[in-house]
Image (tube, rainbow, N blue to C red):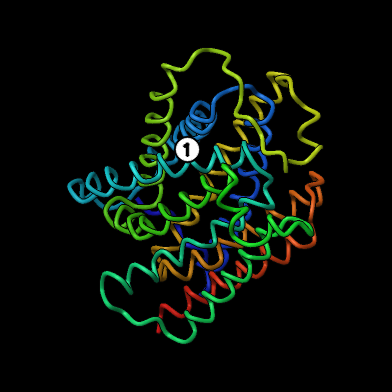
Amino acid sequence: MRIAAIAGPSSWVLLALGTAAGETVRDLALRAVLRHSGWSTLRVIGTSSALAALLLVLPVLLAGGPPVQWQAFVAALLLGGSLNALAFWGYGRALALEDLSLVLPLINLSPLVLLLAGWWVLGEQPSPTAALGVGLLVLGALLLGRAGQRPAGIGLHRLWTSAGCRWMLLVALLWGIGASVDKLGVRAGGSLLWVMALQATIGGTLLGLSLPLAAGAAPPARSSASSSAWRAAETPGWPGALSLGLLLAGFAGAVGTVWQMQAISQTAVVHVIALKRLSTLLGSGAGVLALGEPEGRRRLVAAALMLAGAATVLWGALG
């Protein structure tokens, strides 16, 4: 099932940019719900993914397309669903525990996983362009991990000692490994059907795992580095606002992911991911400017360096 492509030779660029915008909206909405609802991460991320799947049911039923290659589709869904369920759970944990401007730039490390895998497993030598990208990523990570003027907080040590950062590092690893699975699913079933099935798998898995948890469990403890703007809100918010936040996260996630899958059906995965990662800079900017997160100038410079590094590694992978 294919959605109509946007006219023009660079339609994938517009779709990838739309994906970045959608992910930024989703991150902000999820952040608010995770911090104010009192729900577990499994429940929040599972519900938003299930809502995204439900929002796509009607478009999938109305859209026409070629027959689905079910064997390839199911195989891709089993692998992609497992990787993404764990990744989105870790993603939610990171958003709940730390500032957006601290954890979002770490997603840019996912292309490094692809580069290292090709080097260690396949013996592929990194190109000079890719090596430059790695340097930018390391420089950005060192700058991001620096904590003011305290020597003990300088460098990568702080990123590893923060639970939220560790979760996002796991997410970067998982998304680096599974970056090509989506393309297989889109080829077998089309953008709409793949995204609906993937979101339903993620939502069903996480909601199922959340059932044994005690009702009304407290949200995860936040890092001491979390912004005061979020520390002020310790009690669950108005149910209507939280429902709206979940619906907005589901809608933005559904639309953004469909645009991403349509984009990767038109060009190489690395092209799309390089532009999609603009969401890390947009989300970091929103955290600093809208939410008052600390150390804003340094974190935004670090985010820009890591984004440039990720894009350079991805483009260097093309040879």
Q: Say which quarter of the image contains residue 92.
A: top right
Q: Nearer the viewer, residue 285 or 252?
A: 285
The residue that mark 1 highlights is: 89
In this picture, residue 245 sits left or right of residue 172: right
Q: Nearer the viewer, residue 249 or 12?
A: 249
Q: Residue at x 61, y 43 (%)?
A: 26
Q: How many marks?
A: 1
Question: Residue 291 at x, y = what percent?
Answer: 79, 44
Q: Amino acid at mark 1?
A: Trp
Split into 4 quadrants, where in the image is the C terminus? bottom left
Q: Residue at x 51, y 45 (%)?
A: 167
In this picture, residue 82 sits left or right of residue 33: left
Question: Residue 201 at x, y = what percent?
Answer: 36, 35
Question: Residue 115 at x, y = what percent?
Answer: 40, 71
Q: Nearer the viewer, residue 60 or 137?
A: 137
Question: Residue 106 at x, y = what percent?
Answer: 57, 57
In this rendering, the answer to whether 133 lies above or below 31 is below
Q: Residue at x 58, y 43 (%)?
A: 164
